[in-house]
Image (cartoon, grey):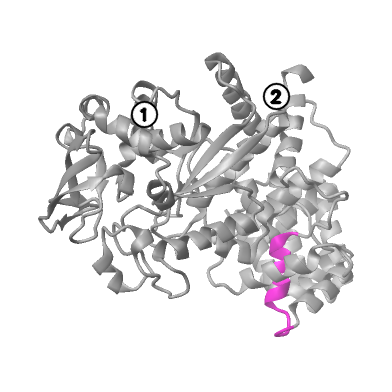
């Protein structure tokens, strides 16, 4: 593979950025500023999936800049959306506000001006903590200020052809009978329950009837009011089937990623942008949804969220960015139990970046280095920080005296010869791991694949641990077990670390086993090789 074949930093982000630019050039559009967009939901607690959309789009922005193009991320908050159901963990009185625009619902926690502002602040705080730079755009402000008015008028003027195309593409006949626009009812102040019947371009009004609608599995009854809504007053919004297209055209968006569940909506919006608004839709990248361990998609309403705020209580921003940048294809389960995996994955990536090792496959080498650089937002440290397996920090913190986790862990690490108190960033990592160790619910460490010799050596070492009198005896038993079974220390010790810590590196075994408990370590090793 020649260096000329490597695009940018060699990652999927670079490929997407390159393909976006190539498409723009074929379209003959200016590329002096290439905007990317991310939609931010405002109807429930932000979770890993919702923040992931913005993180990925920001990665593409960085890749566009790597290729030499100025770029900007627009973070569009759909805060004019109607509340469809009360999310888990929110007060039950919100049921009285179902189908009200979330920007017009009181803050259930009484610390912001509205429900939408409260939820939006949590998401924006997460993006800020993750170092994601963006230009925020409120949906309710976009409608109120008329930013989408031209697109709304064009869409409503072509509603018949749009309704026919929607039916043709996805088999939904609803929009052959009503317009893809929902005014806020002047009588009951709700959205979505109104059905837009006709558009008068001379008066710039939509005639509607508050008939009701199905939200999720329930039908929400309308109040029966019939009236007119003036487009320029911003008291209504486009339906999802066409709203993306309006935003793309209004804000000149050239790239937007989307989740698999929005495939049909994007297909329709692409057609509307191209054939109704005369705006070539942005280049897309599709990603799979995150799932919980049972295989269910992460959902605000189900309440199985992993929120970015929670993640950042236990782990570094880099670990969460790595989760998003590592790959875009394929569904993945995500849980707070997995945090040690992502923390150690980042350490491994950092070890490779600062080492003199180079993969003989130049594309793979560039991808590894590029992934690290994007994960650090193109601002890697000048020197490699100290790396200590996350599970080791968590285990030590769990047995530390109350209120003295940092001091205890640092002393034990010094005993193991692994790190000093001066190691940059280590106290923060201890703090994360200490919190994680006490949160409840821990993931079993996957048993590594061991050959017959390694299994036998581990089994013999596990039994010898129980008879050892001190740390030196345990250390000697490890070397003896390896030698007896024809293994070099560099082959044997990583197997033991993998079983105990989920990592290929770790502390001096003798002192560590004494700290962790000889019986407990012996049992963990024997259980791992029992199968």
Quadrant the N terminus occupies: top right
Image location (x, y in percent) of residue 524 = 65, 64
Q: Residue at x 49, y 28 (%)?
A: 282
Image location (x, y in percent) of residue 9 = 73, 31
Q: Residue furthest left?
A: 224
Residue 180 position by quadrant: top left
Q: Secondary structure at mark 1?
A: helix
Q: Secondary structure at mark 2?
A: loop
Please say whether residue 133 is one of the residues in the magenta stretch: no
Task: Answer with left or right where residue 432 lies relative to residue 175.
Answer: right
In the figure, 513 relative to 141: above or below? below
Work out whether residue 422 or residue 282 is closer to the camera in this orientation and state it: 282
Q: Residue at x 48, y 42 (%)?
A: 331
Mark sitting on residue 210: none
Q: Which residue position holds label 1?
A: 267
CB-based contact (under 8 Å), mark 2 and mark 1: no
Mark sitting on residue 7: 2
Q: Would you call the spot at circle 2 few (<14 residues within 10 Å), some (14-19), or many (20 or more)?
A: many
Work out whether residue 490 or residue 203 is closer to the camera in this orientation and state it: 203
Question: Magenta-highlighted stretch: main secondary structure?
Answer: helix
| Label 2 or label 1, whichever comes before in sequence order | 2
Please say whether residue 394 is one of the residues in the magenta stretch: yes
Task: Answer with left or right where residue 110 lies relative to residue 10.
Answer: left
Alpha carbon of mark 2 to alpha carbon of mark 1: how far?
28 Å
Task: Answer with left or right where residue 372 lies relative to residue 13.
Answer: right
Image location (x, y in percent) of residue 181 = 26, 41
Question: Could one spot residue 359 in this view of the protein?
Answer: yes
Write down the region rendered in magenta: 389-403
In the figure, 70 relative to 24: above or below? below
Q: Would you call the spot at circle 1 few (<14 residues within 10 Å), some (14-19), or many (20 or more)?
A: some
Image location (x, y in percent) of residue 162 = 26, 27
């Amino acid at each position: 593979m020649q260096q000329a074949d490597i695009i940018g930093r060699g990652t999927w982000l670079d490929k997407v950025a390159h393909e976006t630019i190539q498409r723009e050039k074929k379209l003959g559009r200016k590329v002096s500023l290439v905007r990317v967009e991310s939609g931010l939901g405002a109807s429930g607690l932000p979770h890993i999936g919702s923040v992931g959309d913005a993180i990925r789009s920001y990665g593409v922005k960085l890749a566009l800049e790597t290729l030499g193009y100025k770029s900007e991320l627009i973070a569009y908050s759909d805060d004019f959306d109607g509340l469809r159901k009360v999310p888990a963990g929110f007060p039950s009185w919100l049921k009285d506000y179902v189908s009200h625009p979330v920007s017009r619902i009181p803050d259930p926690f009484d610390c912001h001006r509205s429900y939408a502002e409260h939820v939006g602040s949590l998401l924006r705080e997460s993006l800020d903590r993750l170092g994601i730079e963006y230009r925020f755009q409120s949906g309710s402000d976009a409608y109120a200020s008329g930013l989408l008015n031209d697109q709304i008028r064009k869409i409503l003027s072509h509603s018949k052809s749009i309704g026919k195309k929607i039916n043709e593409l996805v088999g939904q006949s609803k929009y052959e009978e009503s317009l893809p626009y929902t005014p806020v009812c002047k009588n009951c102040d709700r959205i979505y329950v109104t059905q837009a019947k006709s558009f008068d371009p001379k008066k710039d009004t939509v005639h509607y009837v508050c008939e009701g609608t199905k939200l999720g599995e329930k039908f929400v009854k309308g109040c029966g009011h019939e009236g007119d809504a003036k487009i320029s007053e911003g008291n209504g919004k486009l339906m999802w089937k066409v709203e993306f297209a309006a935003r793309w055209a209004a804000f000149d968006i050239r790239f937007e990623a989307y989740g698999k569940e929005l495939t049909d909506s994007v297909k329709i919006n692409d057609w509307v942008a191209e054939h109704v608004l005369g705006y070539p839709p942005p280049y897309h990248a599709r990603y799979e949804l995150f799932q919980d361990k049972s295989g269910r998609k992460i959902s605000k309403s189900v309440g199985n969220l992993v929120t970015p705020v929670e993640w950042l209580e236990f782990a570094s921003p880099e670990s969460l960015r790595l989760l998003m940048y590592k790959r875009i294809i394929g569904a993945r389960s995500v849980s707070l139990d997995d945090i040690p995996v992502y923390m150690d994955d980042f350490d491994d990536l950092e070890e490779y970046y600062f080492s003199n090792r180079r993969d003989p496959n130049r594309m793979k080498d560039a991808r590894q280095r590029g992934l690290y650089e994007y994960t650090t937002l193109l601002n890697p440290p000048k020197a490699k920080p100290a790396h200590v397996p996350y599970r080791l920090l968590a285990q030590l913190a769990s047995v530390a005296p109350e209120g003295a986790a940092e001091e205890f862990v640092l002393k034990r690490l010094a005993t193991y010869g692994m790190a000093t108190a001066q190691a940059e960033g280590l106290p923060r990592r201890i703090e994360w791991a200490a919190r994680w160790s006490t949160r409840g619910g821990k993931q079993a460490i996957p048993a590594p694949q061991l050959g017959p010799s390694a299994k036998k050596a581990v089994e013999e070492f596990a039994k010898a641990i129980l008879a050892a009198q001190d740390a030196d005896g345990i250390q000697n038993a490890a070397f003896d077990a390896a030698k007896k079974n024809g293994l070099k220390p560099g082959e044997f010790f990583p197997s033991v670390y993998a079983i105990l810590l989920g990592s290929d590196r770790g502390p001096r075994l003798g002192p560590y086993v004494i700290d962790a408990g000889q019986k407990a370590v012996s049992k963990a090793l024997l259980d791992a090789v029992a199968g």
